[in-house]
Image: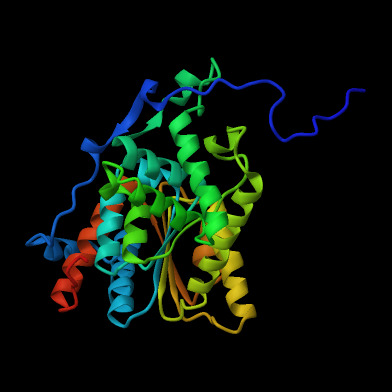
């Protein structure tokens, strides 16, 4: 019987290519555009039937606007698809206006976010690159993200903040499209909750696994602190079927173990399909009230953004973006 490899690094060298050689499926020119409150939109929005999905969406908008008017937390957990389909400008505008006070997401979102800031494009063609083993092996992405991982573990910043500051410090050309960079600039928590082996950056033989664990675990406790302040606030889960609903549920349990959180908060889930964990762990189990909205992200998030702005304007509580 052969001896096990004593090192976590692969026994054979891996081919890692420059990112400039990759074809990207998503480019910044196709991203959503941020508009100020559009005249007539609120009248149209309020004309939607008070039934099922549109009624739920109206409730979500009302709860978010009222939570922020009362100085409460509004957190948003994201799946990677949300950023990959060009919705970061809308999320950033909500952050700048104070309607989102915490962004929590997985490792894949951080990759899309950094690549967009770096080159104005993201999302490789997996089907094309997987057969020859080139899928995911991109030098700049690995170096930057895993460098931020080591930075976060060393400085105590946490993984999300380390990614944001890495983008800002490097003055990446499209940093205005980065949720993490903007969160770092605004002082808003942006946390990354990594599942080891799920992200292309984990295929880097130079990844420091201890640093990854340290920095993402620190983000988990930052998230738990935010959830502990969620009383009369709102938590939105957008496009994460498994990881973020599970992380959120554990954060709720920590908050209640600390005696910080009851049931008086509102949750919502936006996704294209109703998934068990998102509905159960976000909408049903933790809060007094929760709603699910079944829709494509690239349609419902622009509607949500515009409805929040117009509703807040009508109620006299629309802040200017910072």
User: Is residue 120 shown to the viewer in this render?
Assistant: yes
Q: Is residue 14 left or right of residue 101?
A: right
Q: How is the image coloured?
A: rainbow
Question: Relative to 113, does residue 3 appear above or below in the rendering?
Answer: above
Question: Which residue is at a point 54% across and 71% down the rendered structure image?
Answer: 286
Indicate whether 241 appears above or below 310: above
Residue that extends furthest to the left in the rendered view of this protein: 39
Against 45, residue 73 (above or below) is below
Residue 159 place in picture, x, y as percent = 51, 54
Total marks shown come to 0
- In the rendered image, the residue lying farthest to the right is 1
The percent coordinates of residue 144 (x first, y second) are: 45, 40
The residue positioned farthest toward the top in the image shown: 132
**Residue depicted at 31% across the width and 35% down the height:** 119
Q: Residue at x 60, y 35 (%)?
A: 206
Using the rendered image of the protein, determine whether residue 295 is visible from the camera's viewpoint: no
Question: Quarter holding the N terminus?
Answer: top right
| Residue shown at the point (21%, 63%) measured from the top left | 307
Q: Nearer the viewer, residue 202 or 77?
A: 202
Question: Is residue 265 placed above or below 303 in the rendered structure?
Answer: below
Residue 295 is left or right of residue 96, and the answer is right
**292 or 24, which is in the foreground?**
24
- Quarter of the figure that contains the C terminus: bottom left
Please provide percent x and percent y for residue 283.
Answer: 49, 65
x and y, in percent, of residue 85 in the image: 33, 41
């Amino acid at each position: 019987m052969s001896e096990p490899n004593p090192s976590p690094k692969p026994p054979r060298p891996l081919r890692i290519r420059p990112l400039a050689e990759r074809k990207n499926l998503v480019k910044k020119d196709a991203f959503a555009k941020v508009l100020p409150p559009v005249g007539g939109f609120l009248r149209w929005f309020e004309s939607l039937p008070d039934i099922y999905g549109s009624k739920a969406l109206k409730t979500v908008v009302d709860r978010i606007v009222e939570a922020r008017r009362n100085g409460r937390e509004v957190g948003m957990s994201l799946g990677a698809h949300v950023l990959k389909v060009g919705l970061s400008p809308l999320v950033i505008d909500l952050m700048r206006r104070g309607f989102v006070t915490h962004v929590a997401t997985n490792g894949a979102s951080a990759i899309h976010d950094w690549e967009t800031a770096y080159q104005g494009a993201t999302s490789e063609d997996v089907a094309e690159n997987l057969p020859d083993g080139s899928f995911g092996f991109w030098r700049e992405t690995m170096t930057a993200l895993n460098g931020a991982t080591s930075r976060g573990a060393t400085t105590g910043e946490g993984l999300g903040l380390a990614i944001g500051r890495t983008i800002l410090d490097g003055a990446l050309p499209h940093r205005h499209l980065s949720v993490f960079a903007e969160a770092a600039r605004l002082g808003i928590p942006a946390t990354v909750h990594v599942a080891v082996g799920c992200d292309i950056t984990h295929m880097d033989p130079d990844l420091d696994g201890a640093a990854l664990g340290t920095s993402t675990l620190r983000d988990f406790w930052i998230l738990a602190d935010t959830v502990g302040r969620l009383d009369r606030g709102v938590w939105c889960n957008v496009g994460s079927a498994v990881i973020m609903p599970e992380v959120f549920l554990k954060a709720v349990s920590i908050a209640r173990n600390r005696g910080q959180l009851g049931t008086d908060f509102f949750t919502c889930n936006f996704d294209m399909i109703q998934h068990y964990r998102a509905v159960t762990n976000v909408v049903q189990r933790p809060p007094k009230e929760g709603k699910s909205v079944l829709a494509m992200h690239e349609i419902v998030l622009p509607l949500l953004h515009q409805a929040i702005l117009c509703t807040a304007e009508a109620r006299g509580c629309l802040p200017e973006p910072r």
